[in-house]
Every structure is written in structure tokens, then in C-alpha cells.
Amino acid sequence: MVDVILGLQWGDEGKGKIVDYFAPNYDVVARFQGGPNAGHTLYVGGKKTVLHQIPSGIFHQNTVNIIGNGVVLDPVTLKRECDIVASFGIDVRKNLFISERTNIIVPTHRALDKASELQKGESKIGSTLKGIGPAYMDKTGRNAIRVGDLLDKNFTTQYIKLRLKHQKLLDNFHFIEDISAWEEEFFEALEFLRTLNIVNGEYFINNQIAQGKKVLAEGAQGTMLDIDFGTFPFVTSSNTISAGVCTGLGVSPKQINEVLGVTKAYCTRVGSGPFPTELEDATGEELRKIGSEFGATTGRPRRCGWIDLVALKYTCMINGVTQVVMTKADVLDAFEDLKVCTAYGINGAIKQEVPFQMNKVAIEPQYQNFKGWNIDTTAMKEAANLPAEMSSYIQFINQYIGVPVKYVSNGPGREQIVAL
């Protein structure tokens, strides 16, 4: 069976730590979508590290890690990550496997991403400029180069054909930046990629399941960034929801078991797009400061606000979430008063549904107030020790979304998780 861990907000929910926490209980950890725009922060031996493409189970010696076909892979980023992982004494050639159907991000994808975003001006979507969108466009346009193509003697011809196609598009954008250094680095990284375990991903993972192995599918970004169900057009280019596990790994829906959704105790968003509960005041700044809310990939300051239960209930529904993990609850330790968004005011009506296109309507969040706990919870290990105010806050969320919060993270460390 396959259990799933994914984000329920706009990404940055702390999924990497949660996957790392649960990974010892699994034989296989698999990434099923996204690209190097996803930064999962882990603390290994007290040392901070960020993984962008390698599954977060890589630091567990006996765990098999798979990069699935739903991912778009940047070989340059992968090589850098493998070097970092190797510095911890982990042999990636032993426990990292890559599906041959995984699409490759080439240098001109990055150039197209940058050129497109520059042309949008003020209407830009906030792309991380990693080439993810153009890579997925080539996938759906049936032009993509895949990892399995690296083993084909005609690979160079295939690459040149794709590059010429991209160059015509770049000429239309009047993009003149020299990317020769990017290409040099890219081809060096391809040589490294060829030395890794390239496998028939769908057979590989289904054989693991057939052998009774426990599989954990790791999502990137968050549900509100899903290409279909997120805050379009300010979304990512892949399906970040639980349904994406099936298409991103090649497993059938009947194999999906538990779906663990990860949410912060408050809300953040990086980049452009609607964010109903955003706080552009001192409270928002305090959340950012205490929570160290800066992008793991870009370093950009995250927009901060109160938790949005309308959106959270929606994402639990879309994903079929069976249990919730709440992260960064300790960030709220410093606040005397808290707020929770329970409805949207839209055109004079009170709504409890996410609208078709958030950026086309004015949303006035309807809040319920809560008393903060105002004590340090970071050393607490047992649910019975949590302050009554925190328990009330969590219980209200449980009742509203109809899914139980089963775990609370109260700090960045591996051990700072309380089971409820």
C-alpha cells in the first residue's frame, strides 16, 4: 500500500521534516511531482539542509528513494544535492532510483521561464525561474527529453532539435542572454546522472508494493498551487494533490491508503496571487520573523496570515485527507490573541466555499477569535502537556474541517513532534 504526505496550503508547510519523521516506518519514499522549485528543509544531526528533488527519506540508510515520472528533473540541481547528501556519508548510488520516464529540465527551459516572466511585467505569477513551467509544457506538447533518452545513442540529436525549437521562442521574446555556461554545467551533470540508478519506474515501484514494502509518496508545493484546483493562474505546473500520486508514479488508485495532509498553524504564501488572510501589518511581520518565513529555494520573504479553514477544508476534501499534521504551532506561542478564518465575505454574501477564481473577487475573511496560550511549547513531548488554549484551537479546527489533527510539530527538530 501507498501512504501519501502532501501540503494543504500554498506550499512551505514543512513537509520535508514530516516525511523525514515518518520515513523510518517505510521501505520506500517516492517523489511524484514538481521540480527544483520545491525546497524541503531538514535538520540532520542538528545541521540544516534543503532538498529540492531528492526524496526526504534519503538520510535513512535502509530506505529506497524514487524520483517518479511526474517530476521534472534538473540534472544540475540533482548533482549538487547528491554532493550534499554524500557529505553526510550517504551513498546515493545505493538507495536513489530515477524513473526513466522522468522529464528533464534543459537550460533553455530556464531561459524561457525567465523570458516569459519578464514579459508579463506586473502580471507575473512569481515563478522561481527554474524552468519548471516550460518543461511541463514540453511534456504535454510531446517534445520532452526524458531520463531514459540519456541512454539512447541519438540523444544529442534529440537535444539539438529541442534547443532549436526553444531558440525560436526565445528570439520572439527578444531574449539575448548568453546561456553557454548553463549548457556546460548541464552536460557535466548529465554524465553524472547516467551513473545513477535509472529504472522502469512503474514496474519498480509496483514490484516493491507486490513484495509487501511500505511506500510513502512525498508531495511538493501545496494543494492551493495545484494546476487544476489551486488559485489559477497563480499556481505551479503539476498536480500537487493525492490524485497526482497515481499518474506521477504509475500506481493504481486502489493502492492509496492513508493521506496525511500538512498545514501550518497559520498561513503563508510565496510569490504573487490571492491570499485572503494575509496580514500586511505588524502581526504579519511578527509571524514572518518568529517563523523564519523565507523561501528555502529562493530566500524570498513569505507572505503571512492567519489560518484559512475555508481553504483547508477544501484541500482536505480534494485530497481525501485521513489525518492532518499541524506544523509550526510553536510560532504562535508568542501571540496573546489568535484568529481563524471560518468564512469568506464575497459581494455581501457569506460563503464557505473556495470561489472559481480568487483573484477575480474581493474576499473579506470572516474571523473567529481565540485566546493564545502565550507559553513556550517547544520542549513539550506529550499531548497531555500542551496548554488548554492550544488544545481548544486544534479541536475547533478538527470540527470545522472534519479531519483529525493527529500530530503537532512544535519546533524544527526531528524530535519536536507531539502525537495527539
Image (cartoon, rainbow, N blue to C red):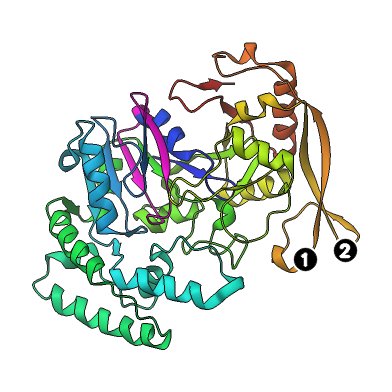
Residue found at x 37% / y 54%: 36
Tell which of 400 and 262 is nearer to you: 262
Mark 2 highlights which residue? Answer: 347
Q: Amino acid at mark 2?
A: Asn
Q: Are marks 1 and 2 in contact (CB under 8 Å)?
A: yes
Q: How many numbered badges does the structure rendering display?
A: 2
Q: Please indicate, yes or no, whether residue 261 appears anywhere in the rendered image.
A: yes
Task: From the viewer's perspective, tell me whether residue 375 is left or right of residue 124.
Answer: right
Q: Please indicate, yes or no, whether residue 203 appears anywhere in the rendered image.
A: no
Mark 1 highlights which residue? Answer: 361
Residue found at x 60% / y 32%: 290
Looking at the image, residue 263 lies above or below residue 225: above
Q: Amino acid at mark 1?
A: Val
Q: Dot 1: few (<14), some (14–19), or many (≥20) neighbours within 10 Å?
A: few
Task: Work out which quarter of the rendered image holds the C terminus and state it.
Answer: top right
Task: Work out which quarter of the rendered image holds the N terminus and state it.
Answer: top left
Instruction: Tell me which numbered mark, 1 or 2, is placed earlier along the sequence.
Output: 2
Q: Is residue 11 magenta?
A: no
Q: Is residue 30 magenta?
A: yes
Residue found at x 32% / y 81%: 166
Q: CA distance from mark 1 to mark 2?
A: 8 Å
Looking at the image, residue 264 lies above or below residue 407: below
Q: Dot 2: few (<14), some (14–19), or many (≥20) neighbours within 10 Å?
A: few
Tell which of 304 and 353 is nearer to you: 304
Q: Position of residue 315 (x, y in %)?
A: 62, 49
Task: From the viewer's perspective, tell me whether residue 21 is left or right of residue 370.
Answer: left
Task: From the viewer's perspective, tell me whether residue 255 is left or right of residue 101.
Answer: right
Magenta-colored span: 24-47
Farthest residue to the right: give it: 348
Farthest residue to the left: give it: 153
Tell me the number on the disc at residue 372.
Answer: none
Q: Position of residue 35 (x, y in %)?
A: 38, 57
